[in-house]
Image (tube, helix red, strand yellow):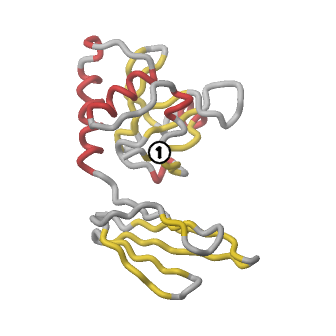
Amino acid sequence: MKTRYKLIGGVVGGIVVVLLVVTLIGRQYWWNAVSKQPTDASVGQQTDTTTTALANVTIVPSQPTNTQQQDKVCAAAQQILQNPGAASFDASGFVQYVYDQAGVQLPRTIAEQVQFGTIVGGASQLEKGDLVVFDLGSTPGTGTFDGIYLGNNEFAAVTTHGLMKMSLNDSYWSSKFIYGRRVL
């Protein structure tokens, strides 16, 4: 299991408050900078987003990556890549179908899909099964195309040339990449 860190902050009475959430070996450990007290919560427990009594501070528990769903997403994408003539998709339809095979319901359009899940900043932080979002339009920074990250800097997507596996290292795609979205 990977160790995950998440910083969460807010302003309380003009004072910046920062919480550090660390997930390590299946348990979450939170350090509250206000009370200066560590707490822990089992990942298996119900851990809904909780707003503290302090204004503007929200504790958002980080979740461990669901590797079983990641594997299902990648397997479904690879299966379609091996037999692309069996189904006809546009870009968002392919993404929606593949995630559905892993039991994840995504919206139908790219405009909705690129708003779904949690933003993953850079390509180096992507995990298999993440959405990869690109700007192919005329409005800079707007997600107009998406695909599914397969690992090893490769992603699958339906382009005007059909369903393809492509590299984020390719100069065209790397220049169009905006961010990833973690939906699993």
Picture quadrant of residue 47: bottom left
Q: Where residue 83 appears, x then y in whole percent?
A: 24, 18
Can you name the residue that lies furthest to the bottom here? 36
What residue appears at the point 51 percent right and 74 percent down from the top-left corner?
A: 20
| Circle 1 Cα neighbour tier, 10 Å, few/some/many (<14 / 14–19 / ≥20) | some
The relative height of residue 138 versus residue 69 in the rendered view (above or below) is above
What residue appears at the point 53 percent right and 36 percent down from the top-left corner?
A: 114
Can you name the residue that lies furthest to the front here? 53
* Residue 41 vs residue 148, the one in the foreground: 41
What residue appears at the point 61 percent right and 26 percent down from the top-left corner?
A: 136
Can you name the residue that lies furthest to the right here? 14
The relative height of residue 3 versus residue 142 in the rendered view (above or below) is below
The relative height of residue 70 versus residue 147 in the rendered view (above or below) is below
Image position of 43 (left or right of 178): left
What residue appears at the point 70 percent right and 34 percent down from the top-left corner?
A: 140
Report which residue position mark 1 lands on: 117
Image quadrant holding the N terminus, namely bottom left
Picture quadrant of residue 141: top right
SS label for mark 1: loop
Q: How many marks?
A: 1
The relative height of residue 62 versus residue 126 in the rendered view (above or below) is below
Q: Amino acid at mark 1?
A: Gly
Q: Where residue 115 appears, x then y in whole percent?
A: 54, 39
Q: Where residue 94 appears, x then y in whole percent?
A: 38, 23
Q: Where residue 97 appears, x then y in whole percent?
A: 34, 26
